Amino acid sequence: MNRLELWGGIECTINRVGDRFYNQTALSGHDHRRADIEQIACLGIRTLRYPVLWESTAPQGVANADWRLADERLPLLREHGITPIVGLLHHGSGPLFTSLVDPGFPRHFAEYAGAVAARFPWICHYTPINEPLTTARFSALYGHWYPHRRDDRSFVRALLNQCTATVLAMGAIRKINPDAQLIQTDDLGKTFAEATPDEKDRVSHRGRAFRALLGHLAPTHPNPTPSPS
């Protein structure tokens, strides 16, 4: 019989503005509160999205990764009967040596994902990159987050890089744990825009992340009319 389950998640954005990183779990104090895990378990939550984020764990590359927080918290979740869904990038653009529009971004990210899987081979659920469409919009279309681009080409590159990185990351993870599952998230809201051509163009981007991730986009796929610069 199917039963209703209560899932949860730690809000854990690490977004970059210029050369400054804003770490939500550090700012909220969660990084320093082991007791949060017990409190979450008391709510009846048995599946929890939990961050092992690239920028905070391996800012200088996987060879110099600092696993101390993950080594403490992931086993603690298991002790409390909570299944973690591990997130590796949450509205971020990676460490200083890369970015969402860097051609090497997918390869670097997959290397990190493989390192996480090798250290925690018992983890079976991953959301490698949270909401790639939202991240691409805020970073490469609206210019709020690094690399602060505001053009269609950068937006598409950021989106495709994240989708490619997710595919490569799951491949690297499944070399360690063939049973690992991808649990993907994204912005799938319905938006109505009739006012201007520019607004219609932005609306047409909705849903493209999942189509790209699933391999449903091809060179013949119709593209939206570029926004006026």
Image (cartoon, grey):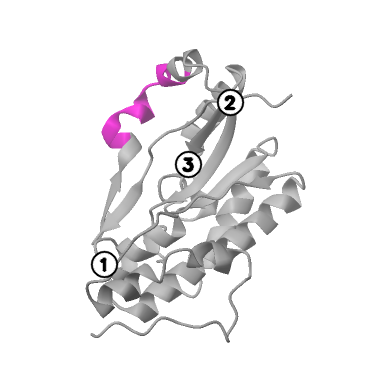
Q: Identify which residue is drawn at 55% across, 22% down.
A: 76
Looking at the picture, does residue 73 appear above or below residue 154?
A: above
The image shows residue 65 at horizontal and vertical percentages of 50, 46
Looking at the picture, does residue 16 appear above or below residue 103?
A: above
Looking at the picture, does residue 127 appear above or below residue 214?
A: above
Q: Mark 1 points at which residue?
A: 142
Q: Which amino acid does label 3 sit on?
A: Asp
On screen, residue 181 versus residue 206, left or right, reads right
Q: What residue type is labelled 1?
A: Tyr
Residues rendered magenta in the picture: 26-37
Q: Identify which residue is drawn at 52% across, 17% down.
A: 44
Looking at the picture, does residue 88 appear above or below residue 110?
A: above
* Residue 209 inside the magenta-drawn segment: no
In space, the residues marked 1 and 3 are separated at their CA atoms by 32 Å
- Quick one: 110 or 7, which is closer to the camera? 7
Indicate which label's residue lies in the foreground, 1 or 3: 1
Q: Mark 3 points at which residue?
A: 66
Residue 190 visible in the snapshot: yes
In space, the residues marked 2 and 3 are separated at their CA atoms by 33 Å
On screen, residue 151 versus residue 195, left or right, reads right
In space, the residues marked 1 and 2 are separated at their CA atoms by 36 Å
Which mark, by number, is residue 161?
Answer: none
Q: Name the residue under label 2.
A: 5
Q: What element carries label 2?
A: loop
Q: Which amino acid does label 2 sit on?
A: Glu
